[in-house]
Amino acid sequence: MKPGLHTVTVRAFHKGTFLGELRAQVSVQPDTPARDGSPRTAPLATLAFDPGEVTLQVLKGADGTYSFQLLSETTYAPESFRLVAGDSHGARERIYDELRRTAAAAGQNGGRDQRQARRRLINLGVQLWATAVPDAVRQQFWEEAGHVASLTVLGEHDVVPWELLYPLDGQREGDGFLAEWLPVVRRVFGQDRVRELSLSRAAFVVPPGSPPEAEREVVALRARLGDTVTDGGTLTHRAAVSDLIDEGLNGLLHFACHNSFTSAGSHVTMADGPFDPIDLAYATQSRALRTTHPLVFFNACRSAGQIDWFSTSLGWAPQFLQAGAGAFVGTLWPVRSDSALLFADTFYERLVADGQSLGQASLNARRAIRDHGGDPTWLAYAVYGSPAACAATP
């Protein structure tokens, strides 16, 4: 519609299942002759779809409007949506701050009254559903609700904490929060579709100064994974983690530590200095993890947080996933260490021991900790990957 450098993106779906994407740039200038570029292609590893998977694609336009499109067995037209304030950052940060305080209070004198805490959470979720999702998309969701098996959100993840949505419209009410009713996963642009997560090896990142529960968490997870998974050791230095990633790590990389998140972004204080998402830039551009597709579980406060960085978002999730990780699990706000340990243990039990899919394992891990004295940690986890992906162990 206007001169300049533009990005063109083509995405392929089979019903509600994302198959792959191709991105290219085109420059348009007045009084300049057209010149053909080289052909661009992208592989589609499989055309298989997962019955019942629905994708909500959320895109941000150049004018600040958002486009919501629900993709299922029915392909609905995109719905434009403009935030009243133009930016959801302030409201989102207020919600996260409240949930951080709620999580902290849950450990004091038996915690807040659990019923009141859940009622407050529900009201936050209902308000989000009513004000952050277009009317037409909510109507489309109810039309699909009877046969939705999982929901994948593709696109602008910092607009809404999707896991906190509580669907309610008049007499139509789902089975609780979206993330306790259905497996809810996320997908970033440039992320591969991975249906098998090889967990032949597991390495753990526990730098000095990590929470006291971190060592207990690693001991519990080693026992949970069993002897068939090769132990890659405990890493405390940034250099060791970077070497492992740049060389193409395989299996599981599990972080049990503190993550500092500010307006400048995330960082983990390692024994030899700070480790932050920019340290993954080489791996991201070289696609160092594309042949191994590891699972990265970042069990630390606000490890799924992102900041704007020039023309994109910068955070642990997009960096690891664009480098080729098969799945990523992180948190949206600060969480309680004891709840985080139980979530991780249950998640691996369901994924590895019980053979459940990524989506189902994360759903059951949420349910395992949702009644802990009003602690909202169970809604804090953001899971990136294919909901149908399964673990493969030796």
Image (tube, grey):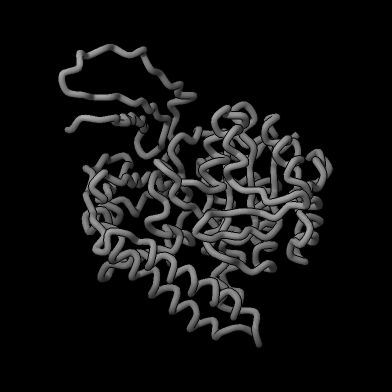
| Vertical side of 109 occupied by 258: above or below | above
Q: Locate residue 121, reporting x and y percent.
A: 45, 74
Kindly identify the residue that appears in the image at 63 percent across and 44 percent down: 296
Position of residue 249 in the picture relative to residue 229 (left or right): left
Name which quarter of the figure residue 35 lies in: top left
Q: Locate residue 300, reporting x and y percent.
A: 64, 58
Position of residue 349 in the picture relative to residue 281 (left or right): right
How many labels were placed on the picture? 0
Name which quarter of the figure residue 165 lies in: bottom left
| Vertical side of 134 occupied by 294: above or below | above
Residues 321 and 350: in front is 321
Q: Evaluate whether residue 149 shows in this view.
A: no
Kindly identify the residue that appears in the image at 53 percent across and 50 percent down: 383
Residues 116 and 212: in front is 212
Question: In the rendered view of the protein, which quadrant contains the N terminus?
Answer: top left
Kindly identify the residue that appears in the image at 35 percent across and 53 percent down: 146
Q: Locate residue 134, reporting x and y percent.
A: 25, 57
Residues 226 and 163: in front is 163
